[in-house]
Amino acid sequence: MAIEKKQRNAIPEQEPFVRAHNFNEVALGFTAELARDEASRCLGCKNAPCMKGCPVGVRIPEFLALVKNGEYEKAGEVVKSTNSLPSVCGRVCPQEEQCEKNCVRAKIDGAVSIGGVERFVGDFMLTLPPKAREIMPSGKRVAVVGSGPSGLTCAAQLAAAGVDVTVFEAFHKTGGVLVYGIPEFRLPKKLVEAEANKLKDLGVKFELDTVVGKTVTIDELTAEYDAVFIGSGAGLPMFMGIPGENLNGVFSANEYLTRVNLMGAYDEGAITPVQRGKNVIVVGAGNVAMDAARTALRMGAETVTVVYRRGREEMPARKEEIRHAEQEGVRFAFLTNPVRFDGENGWVKDATCVRMELGEPDASGRRSPVPVEGSEFTVPADMVVVALGTSPNPLIKDSCDKLATAKRGILVVDEDMMTSVDGIYAGGDAVTGAATVILAMGAGRKAAHSILKRFGLAE
Ligand code: FAD
Ligand code: SF4
């Protein structure tokens, strides 16, 4: 049967020249009318190829059909049955590589905007008052380390089954990367707070400003709780190891984004201000680099240049983030790599870079960049942000040497998400290395299921 063409609805956005100067959310989201219209583009395919692309198996055609009929709460319940943070995922999941990539409309007139409709439904659910729920206490207690998406998801699943859960978080706010990494203009912090508050309604307790491995040890937690889940993420930044990297004004993306997002340094009157660079260089080309570059623009930089040793095609960032960055005025220097930073009075002043060309494919199949001899050049840079990836912080492992780790300090788990220590489970970036929100949530959910099985509370 021929499919009647109907173009995908674009999600309304702030104009680039306006948004480049404020921290308000860039994508404004679908209105109810647009969400219903977009949901009506779904063909309700029997084999639902879109679902095969979703790491947590959201029942996509089912929730879209409910939105089409205006049954938003029912749609939200369908989504929330497998994805506890839809307003977050609707905003930050790489749908173009997952569900939307598989949508049959993708090759006809544009995939259904599954993420856009999911975001609408997630936001709608946050407007509803908490439902009184009778939860039978199980008598079991679990400690969750870290309040990122893996920890929050694990805590939510356990609490809903009557487990007494306490989340231990090193920072003074809950949410992990959702609050300290991803900027306000992509993910408003009030949404993350609202999601965490839903957990408090379920009885989950939060111990903030508590560094596991220092304030309290893993051994102390295992002595007090029936099981432990470690969702401590991958917050240890990697550097290039080149001369001048220790100069003032050279930041890891983690530090820069944490200072701006979590410590509120974008506010002129913040008690922990951050340097405001004029000519900023961001090294790397993933989502974190795009976030750092767009943040530097909003902090008043005159020029922000993303320096990447490969080409545009190889950039790992989401296409949407690259488009947004370019529209806002971020510049890109491809096939370019810094080799040295020079400073004055201890502060970075300029960056010396070298041109690169792509050589033979490396182990990952990508052509490896090779420096072009004699191509060095120097550009002014009073601030540099290094966004080259992260690995798990060794603090937890160092405080509990029974925990087996692999390359770059990632925790080793079995198929039930249990570490080498009986009763200690782990998931998210701490196990995979830096990955995605949805994969961290999937891991938290899987670990919670294993813990419930251990307690005889699940099959
Ligand atoms: P985290 O979110 O890192 O949370 C771990 C928590 O544990 C933190 O709150 C940390 O403070 C706490 N913790 C660590 N050690 C201890 C300790 N010893 N004691 C107590 N608490 C501790 N993914 C996407 O899907 N889409 C995106 O657009 C996207 N953009 C990103 C942008 C940035 C800037 C960054 C940094 C990441 C981005 N990601 C994105 C990746 C995604 O955010 C992560 O994969 C995800 O948050 C991992 O979740 P997690 O629960 O494993 O860990
Ligand atoms: Fe709807 Fe696209 Fe999924 Fe088909 S593949 S059910 S059209 S969202």
Image (cartoon, helix red, strand yellow):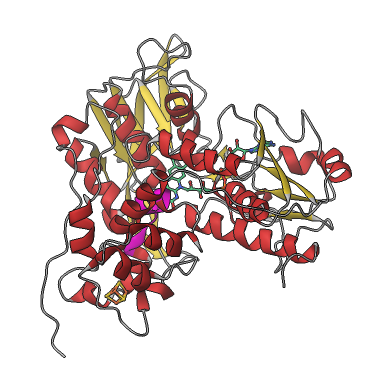
> Which quadrant is the C terminus positioned in?
bottom right
Looking at the image, which residue is at 77% across and 30% down? 214
Image check: 153 left or right of 300? right
Image coords of residue 271 (percent x, y): 47, 11
The quarter of the image that holds ligand 1 is top right
Q: Is residue 100 visible?
A: no
Image coords of residue 414 (percent x, y): 73, 66
User: Foreground residue, 367 or 248?
Assistant: 248
Image coords of residue 245 (percent x, y): 49, 27
User: Foreground residue, 429 or 122?
Assistant: 122
Count the marks: how many? 0
Looking at the image, which residue is at 24% across and 78% down? 43
Name the quadrant containing residue 117: bottom left
**Residue 364 position (above or below residue 404):** below
Image check: 1 left or right of 114? left
Q: Which residues are magenta?
A: 87-96
Looking at the image, which residue is at 81% across and 51% down? 139
Q: What is the magenta segment's predominant secondary structure?
A: helix
Image coords of residue 185 (percent x, y): 32, 35
Which residue is farthest bottom? 1
**Residue 106 position (above or below residue 215):** below
Image check: 43 left or right of 359? left
User: Foreground residue, 129 or 168?
Assistant: 129
Q: Is residue 148 visible?
A: yes
Name the quadrant containing residue 339: top left
> Which quadrant is the N terminus positioned in?
bottom left
Residue 321, magenta (yes or no) = no
Looking at the image, which residue is at 20% across and 70% down? 41
